[in-house]
Image (cartoon, rainbow, N blue to C red):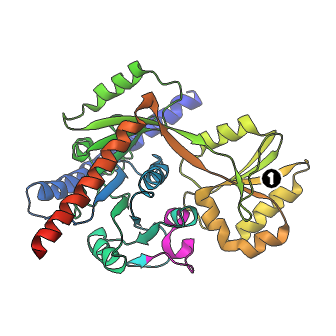
């Protein structure tokens, strides 16, 4: 038996044993959603506009750069706040980011927002239902709240629900945990107001997009958009100076769910590449920092540079003093999203119109009550 056939046989056998677990998990999730759908469990709606960004699968759909896109879109007209769970943070409960904040206190993704957008209010709370009132009480100037990874948090009724699905593994081709990577059964996509297919190839055709849209089977009121990722100019982790990867030999330090596109991009830019890969959301220990230094120092090439992602940079920053002692350049590679088929302005209008309309309605209600 060939090795490939043997692996396929083993994988198929494992999936057979996992199916009963998937059925049980799927039934529990279905019952929970049914209790919300019938009103047995209630969802709270807040006076401030709330926009939720999430996914059906576990990790790796590009949710963070889409949150950042929304921050850029809204921040010049409105006072924007984000609220995340703060995955793998060492604290609990509601917290607002401040000058003493680090990734251990609020998590790496919220820390990334905080480091990147100085005027943004960044908060974390496991329970969004209780976290949002605390946020609005402590920051009454906040106009709009962006909920990070909250598609499954049905206790909060968002004004706009944005569902992100990966072009390379769309939810309609996936299965529920533990057989697949879905947190909920496929029909849960119907709760979304907007569906974004992320990580699309730059040369994606409208014909291919139409075929995917047909597979998604959107409801009449749902809007579908397609986005691609692109890398911006790297910058120095400490000085923020812009850097180039051209002709460099790169030691890549990454702890993200799906590093393949990042690796492919750096291979196109750099002279050579050495990869140090860690688990997603990995908090670097002293031994990891020593491993990174050793990999850099022992690589017998010139023009060496350490490159990392913005999310990893928040966790490396916890070892700022040690890293600065080396005098080694650490480049951070930022990423953004853009909309295909010239649909960015259409998406922007949906978000801006919702935010302005909700704020105007709330203002009318407030002044009407005073009169």
Per the image, label 1 sits on a secondary structure element best described as strand
In reply to whether residue 159 is colored magenta, the answer given is no
The answer to which of 30 and 76 lies nearer the viewer is 76
| Side of 318 relative to 16 (left or right) | right
**Where is 42 relative to 4, above or below?**
below
| Side of 146 relative to 250 (left or right) | left
Q: For the C terminus, which image quadrant? A: bottom left
Which corner quadrant of the image does residue 359 belong to? bottom left
Q: Residue at x 10, y 73 (%)?
A: 369
**Where is 168 relative to 80, above or below?**
above
Residue carrying label 1: 305
Find the magenta span and give its range: 96-112
Can residue 89 be seen here?
no
**Where is 217 relative to 152, above or below?**
above
Q: Which residue is drawn at 11% across and 69% down?
A: 368
In reply to whether residue 100 is colored magenta, the answer given is yes
Percent from the top left, x then y, of residue 203? 53, 24
Percent from the top left, x then y, of residue 130? 27, 75
| Side of 305 relative to 370 (left or right) | right
The answer to which of 6 and 295 lies nearer the viewer is 295
Can residue 251 be seen here?
yes
């Amino acid at each position: 038996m060939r090795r490939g056939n043997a692996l396929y046989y083993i994988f198929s056998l494992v999936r057979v044993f996992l199916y009963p677990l998937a059925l049980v998990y799927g039934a529990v999730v279905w019952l929970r959603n049914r209790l919300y759908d019938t009103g047995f469990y209630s969802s709270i709606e807040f006076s401030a506009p709330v926009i939720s960004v999430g996914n059906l699968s576990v990790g790796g759909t590009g949710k963070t750069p889409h949150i950042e896109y929304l921050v850029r879109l809204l921040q010049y007209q409105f006072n924007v706040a984000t609220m995340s769970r703060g995955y793998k943070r060492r604290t609990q409960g509601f917290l607002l980011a401040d000058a003493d904040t680090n990734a251990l206190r609020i998590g790496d993704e919220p820390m990334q927002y905080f480091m990147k957008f100085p005027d943004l209010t960044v908060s974390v709370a496991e329970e969004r239902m209780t976290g949002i009132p605390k946020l609005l009480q402590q920051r009454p100037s906040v106009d709009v709240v962006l909920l990070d990874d909250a598609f499954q948090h049905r206790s909060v009724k968002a004004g706009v629900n944005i569902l992100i699905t990966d072009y390379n593994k769309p939810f309609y081709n996936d299965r529920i945990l533990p057989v697949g990577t879905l947190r909920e059964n496929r029909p849960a996509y119907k709760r979304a107001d907007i569906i974004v297919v992320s990580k699309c190839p730059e040369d994606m055709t409208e014909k291919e997009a139409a075929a995917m849209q047909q597979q998604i089977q959107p409801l009449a009121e749902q809007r579908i958009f397609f986005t691609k990722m692109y890398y911006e100019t790297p910058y120095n982790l400490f000085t923020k100076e812009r850097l180039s990867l051209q002709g460099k030999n790169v030691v890549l330090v990454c702890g993200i769910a799906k590093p393949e596109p990042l690796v492919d991009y750096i291979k196109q830019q750099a002279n050579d590449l050495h990869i140090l890969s860690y688990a997603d959301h990995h908090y670097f220990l002293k031994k990891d920092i020593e491993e990174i230094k050793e990999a850099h120092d022992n690589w017998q090439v010139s023009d060496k540079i350490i490159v990392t992602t913005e999310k990893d940079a928040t966790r490396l920053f916890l070892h700022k003093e040690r890293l600065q002692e080396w005098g080694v350049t650490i480049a951070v590679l930022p990423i953004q999203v853009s909309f295909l088929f010239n649909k960015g302005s259409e998406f922007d209008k949906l978000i801006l119109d919702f935010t302005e309309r909700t704020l105007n309605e709330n203002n009318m209600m407030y002044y009407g009550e005073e009169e």
